[in-house]
Amino acid sequence: MAGGNAERLFIPESSDEIAAILRDANEQGIAVTISGGRTGTVGGAIPFGGYVISLERLNKIKSIDKDARVAVVEPGVILGDLQKAVEADGLFYPPDPTEWSCQIGGTVATNASGARSFKYGATRAYVQRLTVVLASGDIVNIRRGEYVSSDEGVIVIGEISIKVPTYERPDVRKNVSGYFNAQPLDAIDIFIGSEGTLGVITEIELSLLPKPEGFFSGIVFFERRDDLLAFVDEVRGYSLASRECRQTADTPTIDASLVEYFDSNSLKFIAEKFSETPDVAGAIFFEQETTSDTEDALLEQWNALLEKHNADLENSWFATNAEDREKMRAFRHALPLTANERYSRSGFRKISSDMAVPVEEFRSLLKFYEYQCGPSGIDHVIFGHIGDCHLHLNLFPKNIEENERARHIYGRCIAHAIMLGGCVSAEHGIGKLKRKYLAAMMGERYLNEMADIKRAFDPKGILGRGNMFDESYL
Ligand SMILES: Cc1cc2nc3c(=O)[nH]c(=O)nc-3n(C[C@H](O)[C@H](O)[C@H](O)COP(=O)(O)OP(=O)(O)OC[C@H]3O[C@@H](n4cnc5c(N)ncnc54)[C@H](O)[C@@H]3O)c2cc1C
């Protein structure tokens, strides 16, 4: 996002310092932008005037309690560092938004998720307590379960009273479009995913999982797209069912931790780095947690399912050790890498979608993407989190005329996703770039309900100005 600028940059080392900065800014009505690792893709951490608070010096892992499986961290801890630290203690922190240089505070503020969210959920599932400095400079501690809405639909935190919004969240597996809502509503969930608009998160308590013993993964190729989609439907069905009933070592069943899709165009891109990639209709990258007791039975079940759906087993790749899995990650990474190399000099930004739709509408959205893009002649790829019915469509315009048409295609795809009951952002957030799409999804009434929450925490609207909603709502 171009044109960012600020009057002052603060790099504080404590919540008290942040409180003093906010008190001053609030008094004067100065805008404050909170900056984490700045890996966000929707401009949320980009300031347009005012103060910037960078959290890079609040970067301590305060504790990791191995027995309780809990970590307490400051917001500036880099995600990759936390993951390594907990793994050294035999623990596992699953949220994995591909870009490991982001900060934990940033991942909480965006409710980040990634490929493995299919099994393990998004960041929200792990946040147990937050310390937040509000715009007034007040510091609040919010533990999950402590500030929950009353039967009358009101949450009270000290002198602040919030009315629970009346909007329903779309029935999708991933969604970061607007403030969270539920009945009853826990205050901690409003802050998670609030994109720097409600307060500065200065301490986070996270729950952790035991480190899985092993993983079995595969990149499997399909000659026919219908076979691939039928395979995914069955994997999703088995995985969701197996989470509902308790697994035992005697009767393990397929339960994928990730299910990722690459269309035929994506495979052509990847072939520039991995020449052994076949030219077929598509591929699925999957991963399954295993133990020494369950591995053989699970391998057999995956093999049977792949055979049933006519996967090209001869050309597919499988991995049970970390080294081979690394190669698979490199395969996945080859797609953005090649795209960036090929188009970085075109002068036009890629246009990328982030919508998710209900499971039963997924095929309709995919068909719509293909119907819009195929005949357009504009270079494009469709790939991503098919397990969660959340695919990224990337269009690569090469000239002004293509850029114009690509934008129209994008707009039509968003409208279609909304019509199917989907959300406009499943993982990247709204930031400054997707406000008008959030407005299209939620409508004026519900945006006003969100603005009421914003005003309750930040009456002068100094925090994250321009993020999520247009200033006219505040
Ligand atoms: C190559 C690439 C791949 C990506 N893939 C994914 C993906 O698969 N899934 C996904 O979810 N995201 C993905 N992202 C987006 C990004 O990595 C995530 O949104 C990440 O969580 C942002 O963290 P950050 O520390 O960089 O935050 P920033 O970009 O600095 O900030 C993001 C927002 O959070 C606010 N914020 C930051 N810190 C705090 C705090 N302590 N308190 C309050 N507000 C705060 C900011 O004001 C801003 O609005 C990807 C990004 C890149 C570059």
Image (cartoon, helix red, strand yellow):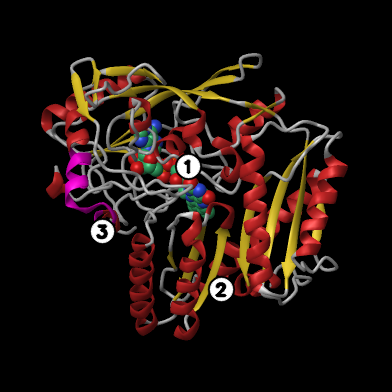
Q: Residues within 10 Å of mark 1 (few under 14, many from 20)?
A: many
Q: Which one is earlier in the sequence, the residue at label 1 or at label 3?
A: 1
Question: Toward the viewer: 17 or 110?
Answer: 110
Q: Amino acid at mark 3?
A: Ala
Tell me what residue is drawn at x 37 percent, y 49 percent: 170
Q: Which one is earlier in the sequence, the residue at label 1 or at label 2?
A: 1
Q: Based on the picture, tell me whether residue 238 belongs to the magenta stretch.
A: no
Quadrant assignment, res 385? bottom right
Q: Amino acid at mark 2?
A: Arg
Is label 2 within 8 A of ligand 1 (CB to nearest ligand atom)? no
State the CA–CA distance, disc 1 to disc 3: 23 Å
What is the magenta segment's predominant secondary structure?
helix
Is label 1 within 8 A of ligand 1 (CB to nearest ligand atom)? yes
Residue at mark 3:
440
The secondary element bearing badge 2 is classed as: helix
Left or right: residue 248 versus residue 471 is right
Residue at mark 1:
112
Q: Amino acid at mark 1?
A: Ala
Left or right: residue 285 versus residue 313 is left
Which residue range is magenta in the image? 439-451
Q: Is residue 35 above or below residue 225?
A: above
State the CA–CA distance, disc 1 to disc 2: 28 Å
Residue at mark 2:
342
Q: Residues within 10 Å of mark 2 (few under 14, many from 20)?
A: few
Question: Toward the viewer: 2 or 237?
Answer: 237
Q: Is residue 206 above or below residue 95?
A: above
